[in-house]
Amino acid sequence: MNPHPNRDLILINVAGFLRSFGVGFMGVVLGIYLFRVGLSSLFIGLIIAAGLAGSALATIVMSLVADRIGRKHFLVVLSLMSAVGGIALATTPGLPVLATMAFVGMLNGTGTDRSAAFALDQAVVPGLVPDPKRTWNLALYNLFLDGGGSLGALAAGLPILLESHWGLSVFSSYRVVFFGYSGLCLAVAAPYLFLSPAVEIGSGSALAPFGARIAPESKTIVAKLTTLFSLDAFGGGFLTDALVAYWFFRRFGVAEHDLGIVFFTVHILNACSHLGAAWLARHIGLVNTMVFTHLPSSLFLIAVPFAPSFKWAVLLFLCRESLVEMDVPTRQSYVAALVKPSERTFASGVTNLARNVFWAAGSGAAGVMMQVLSFSAPLLIGGGIKVTYDVLLYRSFHGLKPPEER
């Protein structure tokens, strides 16, 4: 048993907060910055997709080896690698090098932390608390993530602030903050260095083949959940913060500092919704909470492109964001509840891997659709895909209860 579980939980929450601060910032400015340096909607989508693909590969490696080489060490290495993304943007090399560095640095343009570290944290947290507290502590973890993301989104006005107060060019201002982002990524490693041995499953055994450490019944459940989460993530790839901020920027001419306020509000709503999700799940169950909050959020999103003005579009978008993240801690808790503690790294890795791969595919497709179909197509198609996911999830899993609901 861990004599100091609260200390480990605090360290994980602090690391998640710092990491999410950088992600929230990138979610607002990445698409706009790449547009400013001359990239088309197609190539913006591809750069975002490259970062997500890098995160997907890191998640594969995490699923295979993190429990063997040590979760703590793996989390530190991931934090150090993520600094490469900021260096890539600060130096702005040619497109092939930029895409490669975005891949290596796992550059996240979703505005929401979907990294391999995020997936590994999900495997660690449930093992530090008893089952009745699992959903609540995952909700608290996600509260810290969205709190960091909200402040990061608010910091999106920093390049313009530096330009006006320091007399820098807009591109020099962006370079300063991108180097700052890389420094932040290095700082994320510090809390992980102080984690106790209680975060580990064990060590000393030979590396097992992919999936060999998970029971057949768990494999079936994880496979079904992974298929459904892939559908949801593909729809989510159309709706990354970077692309939505870019949509508002082009559709209504909204400046970065105003978009920073919008996405600050978004992340505050997301953060508060996590605690609401933990409370609601205690009364109606995890699956019901996931579906009955996520479905109306998708309908709000589909309505956004039809808004006659920026104010109406933002109102609908904020209504969507007040609900859309309520399935996050409940989903994480549900996955952890249905498998054994020793299978959680694998289950979290596989489900998050699928989400990252299909987010990357959705981001790339969104850029193409913006370019050749309709500028608002990603919002409509992404929302429709998510509605389909909610219906299928309820049909497949509403009868399968976690231990605390049986």
Image (cartoon, rainbow, N blue to C red):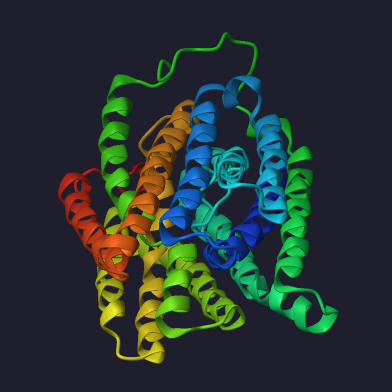
Instruction: Judge by depth and name the residue closer to the eye, 77 or 42.
Output: 42
State the residue at coordinates (25%, 67%): 380
Asked if residue 192 is positioned above or below residue 70 in the image, the reply reads below
Q: Quadrant of the C terminus?
A: top left
Q: Is residue 190 above or below residue 175?
A: above
Q: Along the line of sight, which residue is nearer the eye, 136 or 404? A: 136
Instruction: Locate residue 390 relative to residue 314 in the image: left or right.
Output: left
Residue 79, quarter of picture: top right
Q: Is residue 221 left or right of residue 333?
A: left
Residue that protrudes farthest toward the right in the picture: 166
Question: At 51% from the left edge and 34% from the top edge, which residue is drawn?
Answer: 59
Q: Is residue 313 left or right of residue 345?
A: left
At a point 78% along the width and 52% down the height, the residue shown is 183
In the rendered image, the residue lying farthest to the left is 395
Residue 65 lies, in percent from the top left, at 56, 22
Answer yes or no: is residue 81 visible: yes
Q: Residue furthest top?
A: 206
Residue 127 % position (x, y): 55, 38
